[in-house]
Amino acid sequence: MNARAYLQRQWQQDGLLARLLAPLSWIASQAVRRKREAYRSGRKTAWRAAVPVVVIGNLYVGGTGKTPVVIAIAQGLYAQGWTPGVISRGYGARIGKEPRVGLGANLDPADYGDEPALIARAAAVPVAVHPRRVLAAQALLRACPDVDVIIADDGLQHLQLARDVEIVVQDERGLGNGRLLPAGPLREPPARLREVDAVITNLGSVSAGTQAALGADTDPEQAEQSVIHAGPLQLTMRLEPGPARRLSDGDTRSLADFAAGPPVAAAAGIGNPQRFFDTLRAAGVALAETLPLPDHYAYADSPFGTLRSGHILVTAKDAIKCERLGDPRLWEVGVQARFEPMDLTAWLNTAIARKAGGNRGGSGPAPSF
């Protein structure tokens, strides 16, 4: 068992290491509490944009499936008449003091980060990147004055930016052992879930029976009322894979074609590579080899030399960095988020109207960092 797998097991089962680290987690929880109290009391002031802000985040450290949610929300709001823009940290990118704003299908992941570059390509929206989300939001609105709603990718803990709607994305790991880092996997206490507007559970490729057991039981007729009643809206998300696209020439094939052929390889540098492998197997694709890589893997050099398969399936997040490798074996498999028991963006329209309706009318003061 490697170190990462061991740590995940400790975080899920509250093992000996987790219990030994519990005092450090208590210190972390106090720091989180003081930070939130500073904003609640008014000792610190969050900057409020002149447009609605929707924050997508998670409590569990690492990847839980936020990027497909951001893309789905951006596409859904655009279809309903909004002009969305996205802000993000730009993890792994070469970002200096000033935020960087980009729009287009060919943004360089080295300049914007793999996820923002993917979001810009998939959703055709402008993106702004900077570790300080307020600076990113300000730069986005200056460069793209038509933007009328901001989607903050992975911004739940960035309290300097005022928000109108908060959405948490979690996966099958849930809250783990319920402890904060480093004794557990959480960035904030579990009680934080009661304060957000919606919780989306990413079920990946699990069966419909498992989905029902996990609790996708929100009544569609009551879901919109969750915006004004206690407790967040509960949704589940399934990631449906689309056709595969060969990176070298753009040729496309259905996954059924791969399922009918000989076993292939799959590689993923995402927060939970196993989820991608499970999705392919659920689609009937036999995998002869799998290559899990660290999240945000840079692909400075090709890691595929040891793979013998004639075809290698990779995620869209990986593909955006692998284009330059020139390996004709590489095929991108994108996914589309499907939400149950109701359409996420239909609910979000109501949430924005109720939560942001009285908060517009100009930007507030910039926060003190």
Image (cartoon, rainbow, N blue to C red):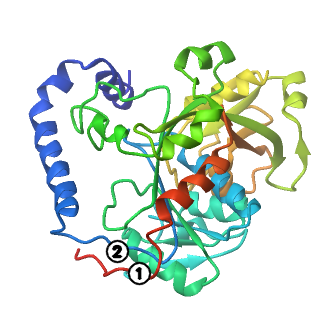
Where in the figure is residue 141, as x and y percent of width and height?
53, 81
Residue 207 shown left or right of residue 243 in the figure = left
The tag on residue 47 is 2
Q: Quadrant of residue 218?
A: top right
Where in the figure is residue 73, as x and y percent of width and height?
63, 54
Q: Quadrant of residue 309?
A: top right
Instruction: Using a 10 Å C-alpha cutoff, classify the residue at mark 1 as few (fewer than 14 neighbours), some (14 to 19) or many (20 or more).
Output: few
Front residue of 296 and 44: 44
What residue sits right under mark 1 in the picture? 363
Up-down relation of residue 346 to residue 178 (above or below): below
Residue 55 shown left or right of residue 318 in the figure = left
What residue is rendered at 56% in x and 60% in y?
A: 353
Residue 278 shown left or right of residue 99 in the figure = right
Mark 1: amino acid: Ser
Up-down relation of residue 330 to residue 121 (above or below): above
Mark 1 residue element:
loop
Up-down relation of residue 186 to residue 20 (above or below): below
The tag on residue 207 is none
What residue is rendered at 63% in x and 21% in y?
A: 206
What residue is rendered at 17% in x and 43% in y?
A: 29
Where in the figure is residue 203, as x and y percent of width and height?
59, 28
| Callout 1 touching callout 2 (CB < 8 Å) | yes
Front residue of 177 and 259: 177
Q: Quadrant of residue 253?
A: top right
Front residue of 332 and 11: 11
Up-down relation of residue 190 to residue 102 (above or below): above
Mark 2: amino acid: Trp
What residue is rendered at 88% in x and 28% in y?
A: 256
Instruction: Using a 10 Å C-alpha cutoff, classify the residue at mark 2 as few (fewer than 14 neighbours), some (14 to 19) or many (20 or more).
Output: many
Q: Is residue 157 visible?
A: yes
